[in-house]
Image (spheres, helix red, strand yellow):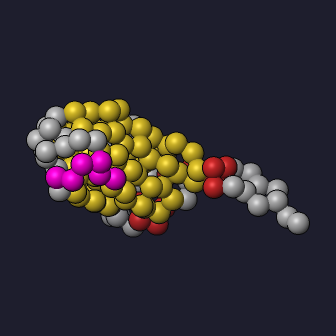
């Protein structure tokens, strides 16, 4: 029987956004999509009396200069223990505009006393026999 990879072997933690509380905008670390074919951003919310919006932005620059473009959005109301997710593929990143976008990051916009953290899982782009 041929070797079949497990899901835990196919996914890696691509980027992370530290735990944040209260109202504000938090930006996660940058992920290079040249090393992945798809990515899923998650926001794990705790107790909240506000709202949360999870966005995935793409840019042609690692520093996100020149105006990033939003390629995916998920929003939640005032529910406690909210989980939001946005899935993007390499094609989504590249087709967002004429520029050669290759970098993505998660951005969380919180209102009220919303708290939580976000992270991006990517598939591994590695040698496979």
Query: Which residue is at the front of the view, 100 or 43?
Result: 43
- For residue 81: magenta? yes
Is residue 62 visible in the rendered structure shown here?
no
Query: Residue 120's spot in the image, x, y percent?
Result: 44, 47
Query: Residue 101's spot in the image, x, y percent?
Result: 40, 55
Q: Is residue 60 left or right of residue 66?
A: right
Task: Give the residue at x 34% y 64%.
Answer: 96
Quadrant assignment for the C terminus: bottom right
Image: 13 above or below 11: above
- For residue 94: magenta? no
Query: Residue 117's spot in the image, x, y percent?
Result: 34, 39
Task: Give the residue at x 14% y 38%.
Answer: 113
Q: Main secondary structure of the magenta part?
A: loop
Task: Give the residue at x 76% y 61%.
Answer: 4
Query: Residue 112's spot in the image, x, y percent?
Result: 11, 41
Region of the chain picked out in magenta, as a range: 78-83
Report which quarter residue 1 is drawn in: bottom right
């Amino acid at each position: 029987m041929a070797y079949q990879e497990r899901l835990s072997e196919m996914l890696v933690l691509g980027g992370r956004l530290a735990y944040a509380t209260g109202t504000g905008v938090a930006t996660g670390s940058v992920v290079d999509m040249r090393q992945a074919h798809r990515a899923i951003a998650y926001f794990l919310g705790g107790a909240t009396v506000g709202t949360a919006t999870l966005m995935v932005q793409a840019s042609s620059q690692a520093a996100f200069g020149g105006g990033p473009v939003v390629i995916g959005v998920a929003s939640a109301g005032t529910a406690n223990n909210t989980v939001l997710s946005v899935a993007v593929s390499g094609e989504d990143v590249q087709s967002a505009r004429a520029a050669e976008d290759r970098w993505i990051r998660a951005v969380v916009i919180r209102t009220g006393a919303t708290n939580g953290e976000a992270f991006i899982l990517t598939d591994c782009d590695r040698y496979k026999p």
